Image: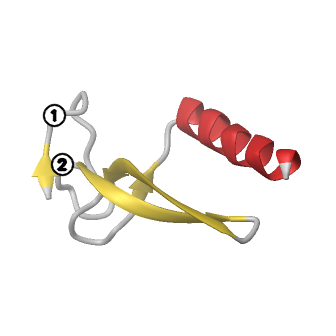
Amino acid sequence: MEHIDEGGLYCARCAVPLARIETKFSYLGHDFKHPVLKCPVCGQLYLPEDFVDSKIFEVETLLEDK
């Protein structure tokens, strides 16, 4: 796990710095992996709005093209 300074973001539950960790996502039956900020202790994710908007849009576009 790579611990990096992401502007001082800490897990609210565990009070430890968030780490950028490759994480598996599943959306509408399709899986993809992407590194996101995650608590290395409890696994709580931090998903910024721009990530959600861009990745979900990308997956939806791929599904619509099929």
Give the x, y percent position of residue 26.
Answer: 61, 67
Mark on residue 17? 2
Residue pictured at 16% horizontal, 34% vertical: 5
Give the x, y percent position of residue 43.
Answer: 34, 68
Residue pictured at 24% horizontal, 27% vertical: 7
Residue pictured at 32% horizontal, 63% vertical: 13
Q: Secondary structure at mark 1?
A: loop
| Gap in angstroms between the C-alphas marked 2 and 1 | 8 Å
Q: Check contact, mark 2 vs mark 1: CB within 8 A.
A: yes
Residue pictured at 25% horizontal, 46% vertical: 10
60 or 45: nearer the viewer: 60
Give the x, y percent position of residue 3.
Answer: 12, 47
Determine which residue is flagged by label 1: 5
Residue 29 sits in quarter: bottom right
The number of discs equals: 2
Q: Quadrant of the N terminus?
A: bottom left
Q: Amino acid at mark 2?
A: Pro
Q: Amino acid at mark 1?
A: Asp
Whichever of labels 2 and 1 marks the residue nearer the N terminus, that label is 1
46 or 53: nearer the viewer: 53
Residue 41 sits in quarter: bottom left
- Is 36 located above or below residue 51 in the figure? below
